[in-house]
Amino acid sequence: MKFGVIGAGQMGGGIAQVAAQSGFDVVVQDVKQEFLARGQATIEKSLAKLHEKGRLTGTPAEVLGRIQFTTNLQDFADCDLVVEAIVENEAVKAQLFRQLGEIVKPEGILASNTSSIPITSLATASGRPERFIGMHFMNPVPLMALVEVIRGYSTSDETAQKVTEAARQMSKTPVECNDYPGFVSNRILMPMLNEAIQCVMEGVAEPEAIDQIMKLGMNHPMGPLTLADFIGLDTCLAIMEVLHQGLGDDKYRPSPLLRKMVQAGLLGRKSGRGFYSYEQ
Ligand SMILES: CC(=O)CC(=O)SCCNC(=O)CCNC(=O)[C@H](O)C(C)(C)COP(=O)(O)OP(=O)(O)OC[C@H]1O[C@@H](n2cnc3c(N)ncnc32)[C@H](O)[C@@H]1OP(=O)(O)O
Ligand SMILES: NC(=O)C1=CN([C@@H]2O[C@H](COP(=O)(O)OP(=O)(O)OC[C@H]3O[C@@H](n4cnc5c(N)ncnc54)[C@H](OP(=O)(O)O)[C@@H]3O)[C@@H](O)[C@H]2O)C=CC1
């Protein structure tokens, strides 16, 4: 299986790593060499950690050796499955899928790791809606068990079956759902994170207190504000916008504080500051 990944950010890097760990030949693309270098460094760190704990089959060098880094989309021509993990923006993703539909061999499957954007709409842009699907990995990809598999309106049974099988080969548990805004994962998770942000805005409690209450009181592994910083506040805002527009209910309105923080460039862990500060 030749496995393609577009975007070498936190999700794309993680997906490429896990695909290579499961023995696939992987090609990962990003728009600039510096983003590829950053993605490679993150993969190397994660592989070293897994190796140290005895949780890696083979050596980090063997796994890394199965990953080709490129800035050229033509390198996806002979891929059997390509997973897109670029910015959560429908117009940008649709434009990419129009190009990929022309480049990837006709029998190749195209998938999006989108958190919320309609799979059916991206499938139409790709020009191969039967061989298009949502393959939604969770962050951090090397540690999280779930892949949410989202069928678009025209996704074929064969495509769903192949992608489910690929997820299992990657030691993940695929769970299917239908194409509604935010699918299941983010329709339920993101309003909770948005509400935690609203609590900060209204002065209900300090961020640390909100996180502690949810960690100690509900046994969540991370508090909601730590998790929002981890996901990326730009991504959280983009998901809330899709929920708000797609479901047409004001209960999904993005918190004004979330909007303001994104406008200020406070994107969470990836920009060095969100609700908390991080070393870069
Ligand atoms: C937005 C979307 O569309 C969908 C989404 O993905 S939503 C986000 C979904 N994800 C979550 O909700 C994550 C919630 N958090 C968690 O489950 C946990 O905090 C976690 C699994 C991330 C970490 O587990 P934890 O028990 O808190 O332990 P923690 O000590 O932080 O990490 C465990 C180990 O894994 C390691 N680790 C963390 N990330 C790693 C990675 N990417 N690769 C390899 N190792 C990693 C840590 O270094 C740590 O190692 P040590 O034990 O040697 O210190
Ligand atoms: N963060 C999370 O927890 C999760 C995110 N997702 C989804 O995964 C996708 C990626 O998110 P995430 O990894 O967090 O985002 P990041 O910002 O970490 O990474 C996105 C990467 O894609 C690059 N990129 C942007 N546009 C293009 C393009 N046209 N072609 C190639 N590369 C491009 C970005 O470059 P640049 O820096 O220049 O923009 C960046 O390197 C989104 O759709 C998101 O909703 C899904 C599950 C969890």
Image (cartoon, helix red, strand yellow):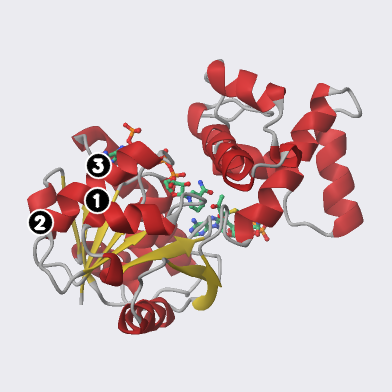
The amino acid on which the numbered mark 2 sits, given as a three-letter code, is Ile
- Per the image, the residue denoted by label 2 is 103
The amino acid on which the numbered mark 1 sits, given as a three-letter code, is Phe
- Per the image, the residue denoted by label 3 is 95
Residue 114, position as x, y percentages in the image? 44, 52
**Spatial CA span between label 1 and label 3:** 6 Å
- Per the image, the residue denoted by label 1 is 97
Residue 199, position as x, y percentages in the image? 84, 31
Using the image as rendered, state which of residue 55 and residue 94 is in the foreground. Answer: 94
Could you say whether the residue bearing mark 3 is in a helix, strand or loop? helix
Q: Quadrant of ligand 2?
A: top left
Residue 155, position as x, y percentages in the image? 36, 72
Could you say whether the residue bearing mark 1 is in a helix, strand or loop? helix
Query: Residue 35, located in which quarter of the rendered image?
Result: top left
Give the mark nearer the N terminus: 2 vs 1.
Answer: 1
Where 265 sits versus 99, above or below? above
Say if mark 1 contacts mark 3, CB within 8 Å: yes
In this image, 55 relative to 32: left or right?
A: right
